[in-house]
Image: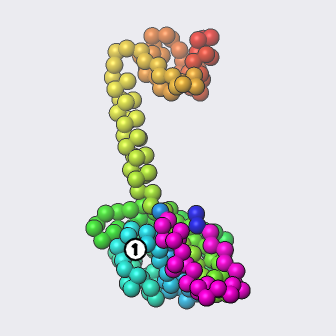
Amino acid sequence: MLRINISPNSKSKNSNSFIKKNDLYNSLNESILIFNEKEKIIDANSMSLKKFGFTKKQLIGKSIDNFITNQNNDVFYKISCIIKEQTYDRRKRISGWFKNQDGEYLLFKAVIKSGLYIRKKIIFVSLLDITESYKNKLKQKESLSILKSLIEATNNGILVVGFDGNIVMYNKMFLKMWRIPKSYIENKNVNQLVDY
C-alpha cells in the first residue's frame, strides 16, 4: 500500500507536482485515484489508466459517477457511495468488479482513505487487481472437487496425509475397510489414527 507523507510547509518548487512526478507512484502495481474535496478526480497513476482504459484527460475533473454504467462498474459504485457518505475518515476496504473496455471483468480490492495534501483535503483510493488470484482459487476448488470425486469413486480405501502428518482427505471405503468412525478421523493426524 502506498503511503504519501508530504509536509504541507514544503518549500520545494515541485511540491505541488509531487504526486504527478513521483516515479514510485506511477510504477505501482496498484491503481491509484485521488479525489479533491468536491469529489472530483484530480489524479490517477499509470496503472489506473492501464486497468480502466481511460486517459488522464477523460478522468481528471470528473466525478466517479461518470464512469458507472449499468452496474458494470460495481467497484466504482461502491467507491462513490463511500465518498458521498463521507465515511472514509477511517480507512474503508471494499471489493468489487469492473468491466473494462475490452469487456473483461476485473475484480479489485480497494482501500479508501482521506488525508491532506498541500493543506487540502483529498480522498485517496488504492485499487489492487485480484482477478488472477480469484481465478486461481476457483480453479483450485474445482480441482479439489474433481479429486474428491475420483477418490470416492474408487474401490480402494484411500487416506491422504500432508507433510505435517495431518489427514488431508480420505474416502468412505477407507473408513469401511478399517472400521473407523467418521467422527473419530475428523481433525486428527496420522499418529492419532495409528493408535486407533
Residue 187, x across and y down, in percent: 59, 27
The stretch drawn in magenta includes residue 87? no
The answer to which quarter of the image holds residue 157 is top left
Residue positioned most to the front: 13
State the residue in front, 137 or 27: 27
Residue at image coords 58%, 15%: 193
| Image vertical order of residue 62 relative to residue 192, above or below | below
Q: Which residues are magenta?
A: 3-28
| Tag 1 residue | 49
Residue at image coords 39%, 77%: 68
Q: Secondary structure at mark 1?
A: helix
| 148 displayed left or right of 115 | left
Residue 88, x across and y down, in percent: 62, 75
| Image vertical order of residue 147 relative to residue 106, above or below | above
Residue 30, x across and y down, in percent: 49, 65
| Image vertical order of residue 164 relative to residue 179, above or below | below
The stretch drawn in magenta includes residue 22? yes
Residue at image coords 43%, 22%: 171
| Image vertical order of residue 21 relative to residue 61, above or below | above
Which image quadrant: the N terminus?
bottom right
Tell me which colouring the rendered structure shows. rainbow
The answer to which quarter of the image holds residue 62 is bottom left
Residue at image coords 58%, 67%: 2
Which image quadrant: the C terminus?
top right
Is residue 82 something one can see in this rendering? no
State the residue in front, 77 or 44: 44
Residue 186, x across and y down, in percent: 56, 26
The three-letter amino acid code for the residue at tag 1 is Leu
Residue positioned most to the left: 102
